[in-house]
Image (cartoon, helix red, strand yellow):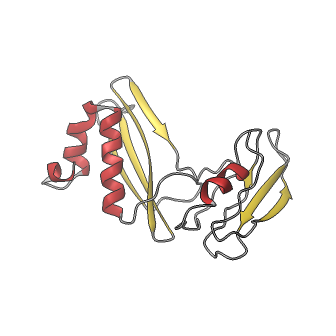
Amino acid sequence: MMNNIINCLCSAEPICERKSFDSKAIDELIKYKCPNCKEKELPWLGQWKDCGALQEWNRIALKKSYHKRILEYNENGVCISEPYKTLEWRNKTKSCENLTIKFYHDNSMYYYCLSFYYLHHGHSFALWIGDRCYPTFEMAKKVAIRHVLKSDKNLRKIIEEFLLPAQGELFL
């Protein structure tokens, strides 16, 4: 278990704010921020035995470029804001088969999450506070498509037909 707070890259000790939270899993929410670096601030997050606000702070503390999150996150660090853009496909004959990629725009950076169910299996994940960001929407889209294809190569035809421009192969 990691208990030590890492100082920010600027060597400042982070400010740690606490507020009570009524939940069966956690009693309080914690917010870390650097007193010197304007961008180094986390939203209110819960703290569990071996994961949560402290570990997230320690993950970003030594990063040179960190973009403060302006989207809304829950106590688990999962984004609850509306997406910037959603790309979606649904099978017209088998309504349970679908592919959804949601993109988020936060402080000039782009993020994605995805969900699919196809040929009796699927994969899904929500946007988490520690997920990687991308400087352009096109770059985030390209990485998301690669992620889908890595998860299930059977979705290639669907991606080419519905989600990519006419010269889609250039983007893969």
- Residue placed furthest toward the left: 167
Left or right for 7, reference 135: right
Residue 167 position within the rendered picture, expressed as x and y whole percent measured from the top left:
12, 54
Q: What residue do we see at 51% from left, 51% from top?
A: 131
Residue 14 position within the rendered picture, expressed as x and y whole percent measured from the top left:
75, 66
Residue 75 at least partly seen: no
The quadrant holding residue 141 is: bottom left
Q: What residue do we see at 58% from left, 65% from top?
A: 69
Q: What residue do we see at 63% from left, 56% from top?
A: 73
Can you say whether 68 is above or below 77 in the image?
below
Most foreground residue, 19 or 62:
62
The quadrant holding residue 33 is: bottom right
Can you say whether 109 is above or below 159 in the image?
below
Residue 126 at least partly seen: yes
- Residue placed furthest toward the top: 120
Residue 16 position within the rendered picture, expressed as x and y whole percent measured from the top left:
80, 63
Left or right for 118, reference 113: left
Residue 161 position within the rendered picture, expressed as x and y whole percent measured from the top left:
19, 45
Q: What residue do we see at 34% from left, 40% from top?
A: 148
- Residue placed furthest toward the front: 11
Left or right for 145, reference 133: left
Most foreground residue, 125 or 143:
143
